[in-house]
Amino acid sequence: MSVAFRRDGDDEHKEPKFELPLPPGPNLVTRRGLAKIEAEVARLEAAVAAEADAEQRTVLKRDLRYWHARFSTATVAPPPPEGEVAFGACVTFRLNGQTRTVALVGSDEADPAAGLIPFTAPLAVAMTGAEAGELVDFGGRTAAIEVLDVRPTAEQAG
């Protein structure tokens, strides 16, 4: 029989499991973001210790490696400059006739539905360095964003 039709086992035909990709750029975090990373590491360490299934334990260990890497590279950012859009700032702006408020946070803390966007997101990058009253280009449009208010997030201020 040709080796082309021979199968030694199902394991050789499974999809490879890759490491979770790390977001590009520096790993800036807020104090709340660092606490979230620490909690995720603790949760995953407990889950790995309690997991009896070898395959599921392998998945948990991969996730744990990701969060260990995020913890070891985390840098708590200082408060943003007064009145300037930067990491840790809470920004109220108008875009396409709609007013929104977002906070610029680290990648692991981001939750766009809750108004937390990563500082590396195109919207955040476009507004970085702007102050209240400025118009900012975005999405190929000149003066697409009007920055209305900039202040430190509650946790960055306190």
Image (spheres, helix red, strand yellow):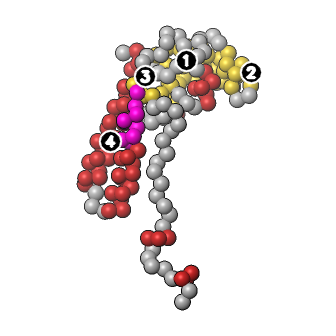
How crowded pointer 3 is (Cα within 10 Å; few <14, some 14-19, many 20+) is rated as: some
Q: How far is mark 2 from mark 4, CA to CA?
A: 43 Å
**Picture residue at 63% right of the left edge, 24% below the top:** 126
How crowded pointer 1 is (Cα within 10 Å; few <14, some 14-19, many 20+) is rated as: many
State which tag comes first along the sequence, 1 or 3: 3
Circles 4 and 1: CB atoms closer than 8 Å = no
Task: Say which quarter of the image contains residue 138.
Answer: top right
State which tag comes first along the sequence, 2 or 1: 1
- Location of residue 79 in the rendering, given as x and y in whole percent from the top left corner: 43, 16
Numbered range of the magenta stretch:
67-75
Q: How far is mark 4 from mark 3, CA to CA?
A: 20 Å
The answer to which of 23 and 47 lies nearer the viewer is 23
- Location of residue 141 in the rendering, given as x and y in whole percent from the top left corner: 74, 25
User: What secondary structure characterizes most of the magenta part?
Assistant: helix
73 magenta-colored? yes
- Location of residue 70 in the rendering, given as x and y in whole percent from the top left corner: 40, 37
Residue type at the position of mark 1: Val
Name the residue carrying label 3: 77
Name the residue carrying label 4: 41
Residue type at the position of mark 4: Val
Name the residue carrying label 1: 85
Q: How many marks?
A: 4
Name the residue carrying label 2: 142
Q: How far is mark 2 from mark 1, CA to CA?
A: 18 Å
In front: label 1 or label 3: 3
**Picture residue at 45% right of the left edge, 79% below the top:** 8
- Residue 78, compared with residue 37, is above or below; it is above
The answer to which of 98 and 150 lies nearer the viewer is 150
- Location of residue 121 in the rendering, given as x and y in whole percent from the top left corner: 57, 31
